[in-house]
Image (cartoon, rainbow, N blue to C red):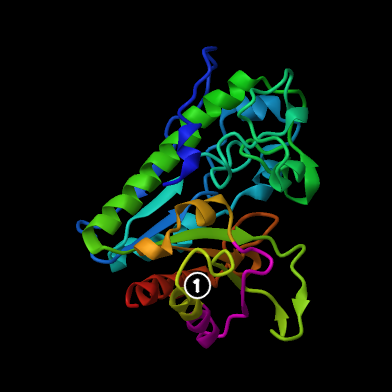
Amino acid sequence: MKAFERHYERSDATRVFIDVERAVTLTAPSEQTIPVVVASPHSGNRYPRDLLQASKLDPSSLRKSEDAHVNTLFSGANSVGAPLLAAEFPRAYVDVNREPYELDPSMFDAPLPPYAITRSPRVVAGLGSIPRIVSAGIEIYARRLSFAEAAARLNACYKPYHNALRRLVRSTHAKFENCVLIDAHSMPTAGLSLRDDLGGPIDIVIGDNHGKACHSQYSEAAISYFRDLGYAVILNDPYSGGFVTQSYSDPERNIHVLQVEINRSLYMDEITYETNSYFPKLTDHITGFIAEIASI
């Protein structure tokens, strides 16, 4: 894709035990029939022992940054002819929607290597590739980490995820001469402002990096599709897209990226993480959305 690839091939010589049995799950139809790839980078819920041992939070609190059930919400992708890639590890462990070495120096027990990105707005906010906090600013760790731990996590999780995603995007583009990557996320209700122009809280945010990540026909179609179903939808506010949206898109070559953020209160209890009775209908609507994007 772009320049980020040159760094995450690095590894640290120190051997560190990482309890990650499987980094990603790829489900695909017997034949891909549409130029769409769906990815869920933050729905992983396999919490490694080394994270639980280093954290001062209980497992339920660690889940505050998890896009719970999003991989299932978008699981209809296969039925309409598209592959679905989902991370198995949690966002609190490794955030693949960041630069690979976007790291907060205050989290580590020694100076970071010079190629680390230590002053980005995401790092300052505590949300680097190894997050310092879960949502609401809650600190994750009871101790400082070593860089060897970070490097081992990135090699075990970040690298396989992006290797798989790049292969999917490239193979889709090669087959169809076009690719639309749908980057699937959820957003907590807390912090979402009520919008008078929408008649209430935001249900869905479509992010296209302010028109840079895809041709406008895709973002316009996404907004129209969900609004016609009665959802309150907005473009790029407050989420215009993260690292994946910015780094994988190349509209001039017909590689487009749409980030989709779903309000969690639509489909689950945000305290217990249990899905609600609307979950099946929302899943059907999202499957229809994937087909709608493919029809353009």
* Quadrant in which the C terminus is drawn: bottom left
Q: Tag 1's secondary structure?
A: helix
Q: How far across and down, in percent of the image, does residue 44 sit? A: 52, 45
Q: Judge from the rendering whether residue 121 lies leftward or rightward of residue 283; answer left or right.
A: right
Q: Residue at x 77, y 27 (%)?
A: 142
Q: Position of residue 202 (x, y in %)?
A: 67, 74
In the picture, measured across the screen, residue 113 lies left or right of residue 35, that is right
Residue, disc 1: 282
At a point 45% along the width and 38% down the height, the residue shown is 5
- Numbered disc total: 1
Q: Is residue 281 left or right of residue 34?
A: right
Q: Which of the pair 43/219 is nearer the observer?
A: 219
Residue 88 appears in the picture as rendered: no
Question: Residue 291, position in %: x, y?
Answer: 35, 73
Reply above or below: 235 against 239. Answer: below
Residue 110 visible in image: yes
Residue 174's spot in the image, x, y percent? Answer: 24, 56
Please give the name of the residue rendered at 59% of the width and 19% of the height, measured from the top-left corner: 148
| Residue 16 vertical position relative to residue 255 in the rendered view, above or below | above
Q: Write the residue at 59% across / 72% down.
A: 204
Task: Decide: is 169 above or below 206.
Answer: above
In this rendered view, identify the residue nearer to me: 102 or 149: 102
Which residues are the magenta region? Answer: 223-240
Q: Is residue 287 above or below residue 49?
A: below
Q: Amino acid at mark 1?
A: Leu
Give the farthest residue toward the front.
252
- Please tell me how crowded label 1 is: few (under 14), some (14-19), or many (20+) other residues with Cα within 10 Å: some
